[in-house]
Amino acid sequence: MYSSITTRNIAITAVTSAIYAPKKPLSPFAKFRQLDRQNSASLSPSPVKSPATEFRFKFTEPTVRDNAAQIKERLLAWCRSKTKEYENVQLDNFSTSWNNGLAFCALIHHFRPDAFDYNALRPENRRKNFELAFTKADEVAGIAPLLDVEDMVMMQRPDWKCVFTYVQSIYRRFKDED
């Protein structure tokens, strides 16, 4: 009995300190990683049972799981169709295929060719490519910059969920224009 009370007190202390701790602003990638860690933690067995840890979000239904994979593949196919004529862009996934910024630039350029000169861009100028893509997407299309340039430059293998989310916003904006 004593150990369950101690465990409960520790859990309450941890929750209380997490709620009342001063919050620093997080970059979009840091927020995604935090949510991913929380999801992973909630899927592992926990010695402390609480209503928050009993709920587990997981695609266990085969049709739902398969549909999620189809949506991901359809979005990637849409991106390929819009960027197939662009040099230095080969879209195989939502991670490394987007790590130099050119795929984002090509997508924006496809729909707004007057916004910038795509042919002047180089794969080795990653920071410039990301800055241009995210700035132009916001300026000429009203697409919020969900990704952080610093995070993208820092990572050779961006988190596919972050890239996927941003590409979805590009798709939603332009899906009816072509």
Image (cartoon, helix red, strand yellow):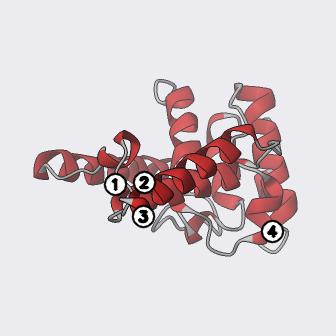
Instruction: Measure the C-alpha gap from mark 3 to mark 2.
Output: 51 Å
Of the image marks 3 and 4, the number of the one nearer the N terminus: 3
Residue beneath label 1, please?
73
Instruction: Measure the C-alpha gap from mark 4 to mark 1.
Output: 27 Å
Query: For numbered disc 1, what is the local secondary structure?
Result: helix
Q: Is residue 160 visible?
A: yes
Residue beneath label 3, please?
3
Q: Residue at x 76, y 48 (%)?
A: 26
Q: Position of residue 91 (x, y in %)?
A: 50, 64
Instruction: Measure the C-alpha gap from mark 3 to mark 1.
Output: 49 Å
The reply to whether callout 2 and callout 4 are in contact (CB within 8 Å) is no
The reply to whether callout 1 and callout 2 are in contact (CB within 8 Å) is yes
Q: Amino acid at mark 3?
A: Ser
Q: Amino acid at mark 2?
A: Leu
Q: Position of residue 35 (x, y in %)?
A: 54, 51
**Label 1, residues with CA under 10 Å away: few <14, some 14-19, many ≥20:** some
Residue beneath label 4, please?
122
Corner quadrant of residue 129: bottom right
**Label 3, residues with CA under 10 Å away: few <14, some 14-19, many ≥20:** few
Q: Toward the viewer: 46 or 177?
A: 46
Q: Position of residue 83 (x, y in %)?
A: 55, 53
Q: Toward the viewer: 19 or 58?
A: 19
